[in-house]
Image (spheres, rainbow, N blue to C red):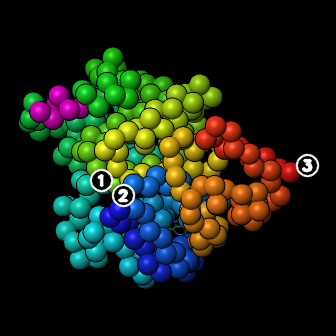
Amino acid sequence: MPTVLQLTDVSVVRNGSRIVDDVSWTVDSDERWVVLGPNGAGKTTVLQVAAAQTHPSSGGVEVLGEDVGSVDLFDLRPRIGFASTTIARRIPPTEKVIDVVLTAAYSVTGRWNEEYENVDVRRAQRVLDEWKLGHLADRTFGGLSDGEQKRVQIARAVMTDPELLLLDEPAASLDLGAREELLQMLGGYASSEGAPAIVMVTHHVEEIPRGFTHALLLSHGKVQAAGPLAEVLTAEILGETFGLSLTVTETDGRFAARAAS
Ligand SMILES: Nc1ncnc2c1ncn2[C@@H]1O[C@H](COP(=O)(O)OP(=O)(O)OP(=O)(O)O)[C@@H](O)[C@H]1O
């Protein structure tokens, strides 16, 4: 399978701190990764490097076969779907839901006077339908529930039919029902034919959708472990990563962790 993301000895230094420390990591096109680790571990920074939004202080980054240091980022970025709260904050609350998704085709947030092709409008509507948002197309983004807003962000990220989909904490702040609905949809999407490679950052093993295949565990900017879920999500490795003694269970493709008694 072709490699879609390759980080080689990547470090990111901010204000003298090495917040990502010598990370090497490879994602192939048929893999769906979850990135786990405690607060401040460097998960979001690694995702921003993968999204070609942040340049590393040292090391090499190849995304979709392109060297991020030398490729034209305006050509590369539309091939990457990226959903994060930072992007969501840029969306005007008064923006219509259909436009939030549609503007992804033009790599902007906030519709101005652009003329959109009918084919893009039809695709945006189809993507909204796929994420069970079709009935909300004419509502404003700011008027949606948290769960609906999260799904709109993902719909926006997949609008350009990306070859790599990056999701930063898509289930954060959702209630149980909204979380489970989102995880079910993400799991279905991850397992569907033609799905792109996916990397999802989360704090909780309970938020790993079915259909995900691999995990990258980070702690203090360093890789603690990387590999297939069954090999990496053990009580020992997760416990080391989070710095406490844990019990980890897996039931029917879903994981759960709690402090060991
Ligand atoms: N511009 C910056 N200057 C200094 N420190 C920074 C900067 N940006 C991020 N950091 C620090 O780098 C560390 C890693 O941040 P990052 O957001 O990547 O971690 P994270 O694992 O996603 O954290 P969380 O789980 O809390 O969202 C944090 O300690 C953060 O405070």
For the residue labelled by badge 2, is the local secondary structure a helix, a strand or a loop?
A: loop
Give neighbour class at mark 1: few <14, some 14-19, many 20+ (Cα, 10 Å): some
Picture coordinates of residue 11, whole percent (x, y): 49, 78
**Is residue 40 visible in this depiction of the protein?**
no
* Residue at x 56% of width, y 59% of height: 228
The answer to the question of whether label 2 and label 1 lie on touching residues, with beta carbons closer than 8 A, is yes
Amino acid type of the residue that numbered disc 2 sits on in the rendered structure:
Ser
* Residue at x 43% of width, y 63% of height: 27
102 to the left or right of 56: left
Query: Gap between marks 2 and 3, in whole Å?
Result: 40 Å
Give neighbour class at mark 2: few <14, some 14-19, many 20+ (Cα, 10 Å): some
Q: Nearer the viewer, mark 2 or mark 1?
A: 2
**Is residue 184 visible in this depiction of the protein?**
yes
For the residue labelled by badge 1, is the local secondary structure a helix, a strand or a loop?
A: loop
Amino acid type of the residue that numbered disc 1 sits on in the rendered structure:
Glu
Q: Nearer the viewer, mark 2 or mark 3?
A: 2
Question: What residue is pinned by disc 2?
Answer: 29
Question: What residue is pinned by disc 3?
Answer: 261
The answer to the question of whether label 3 and label 1 lie on touching residues, with beta carbons closer than 8 A, is no
First to last magenta residue range: 119-124
Picture coordinates of residue 85, whole percent (x, y): 45, 46
Picture coordinates of residue 242, whole percent (x, y): 73, 60
Question: What residue is pinned by disc 1?
Answer: 163
Mark 3 CB within 8 Å of ligand 1: no
Give neighbour class at mark 3: few <14, some 14-19, many 20+ (Cα, 10 Å): few
Which comes before the other along the chain, label 2 or label 1? 2
Query: Gap between marks 3 and 1, in whole Å?
Result: 43 Å
